[in-house]
Amino acid sequence: MTSVVIAAHNEAAVIGRCLDALLASNPGLDVTVVANGCTDDTAAVAAARPGVRVVKRHEAGKAAALNAADAVAQGFPRLYLDADIVLTPGGVHALAAAVSGPAGGGPAPLAVVPRRKLDLTGSPLLVRAFFAVNSRLPAYDRGLFGRGAIALSAEGRARFDTFPPVIADDLYLDSLFTHEEKREVSSVVSVVATPRRTRDLVRRLVRVRAGNAAMRAASAAGAAPPGVRSSARSSWLRDVVLPRPWLWPAGACYAAITITAALAARRRAGAVGWGRDESSRQAERQPAA
């Protein structure tokens, strides 16, 4: 039995859509939603879906929520899914199959992710320019981050005990596996909503950068796995823009936004929690006025 784990903090607007998509096309799932620190109807929305196990925690915190879900989840493979993500119909079973049997005659991967599809509906020009570059970064080649969905086999889940109290949980999982042990399942698509305002994109990047920096620092100090992916700061230019000269205007926007976020993350070092972009968390995304 495949288990799906969802850590949800004030996700009432989107978690119903996520769960409905899962349950409609992936029969036989074991689904656990941990509503942690919620002040909205997240728990009630999740509980209204038949067969969904709901765990309530008063404290907000994604790592603790993931651990609480792991403690009651029934089976493997195990999919860690963000509450605002909608997968291709049948996608959960396809991801589970990828970590359950041999692929191309070789050993099965221990961790797989879906292909990322960006939903740019209503996003302004600067956000679109940023993702025109970001979507082409080679760092996403078999990386377990940025998809909102990571499936692990039982062997893969055995690589660690519990989730550590870090912001970058996807980077943490990515650090546990070699390039050969990870794979993207291109037939499964994860629809990732992009921010609808540039300032919300910057806020998201501040959280991501601060979380990634904390993970790398912990790795260097021996408090986290040594395989944390290093940051290739010039990759956007070397690997994306220079081979595609028509992307120079987008590259300029990308550089300006990332520099702004990096400076903000440095100023807020140690003070960034489990934040997220509220503008992309809408039940129905409509073009911005």
Image (cartoon, helix red, strand yellow):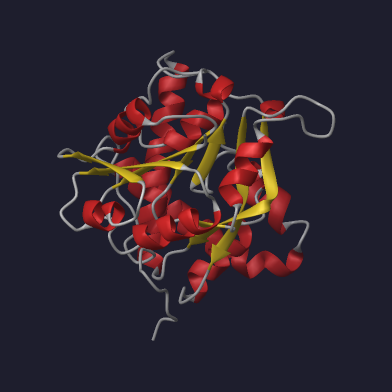
Q: Compare residues 231 and 260 and report the one nearer the observer.
A: 231
Q: Residue at x 76, y 29 (%)?
A: 102
Report the side of 14 relative to 60 (left or right). Answer: right
Q: Compare residues 110 and 27 and report the one nearer the observer.
A: 27
Residue 281 position within the rendered picture, expressed as x and y whole percent measured from the top left:
36, 63
In the rendered image, the quadrant that contains the C terminus is bottom left
Outermost residue to the top: 222
Q: Is residue 254 above or below residue 285?
A: above
Q: Residue at x 41, y 17 (%)?
A: 161
Outermost residue to the right: 105
Residue 63 position within the rendered picture, expressed as x and y whole percent measured from the top left:
33, 32
Q: Residue at x 42, y 47 (%)?
A: 262
Report the side of 74 relative to 157 (left or right). Answer: left
Q: Compare residues 186 and 128 and report the one nearer the observer.
A: 186
Q: Is residue 97 above or below residue 92?
A: above
Report the side of 233 relative to 206 (left or right). Answer: right
Which quarter of the picture shows residue 265? Answer: top left
Q: Compare residues 105 and 259 and report the one nearer the observer.
A: 105
Note whether residue 228 is visible. no
Residue 120 position within the rendered picture, expressed as x and y whole percent measured from the top left:
52, 70
User: Total of numbered circles in the picture?
Assistant: 0
Note whether residue 115 is visible. yes
Residue 39 position within the rendered picture, expressed as x and y whole percent measured from the top left:
15, 54
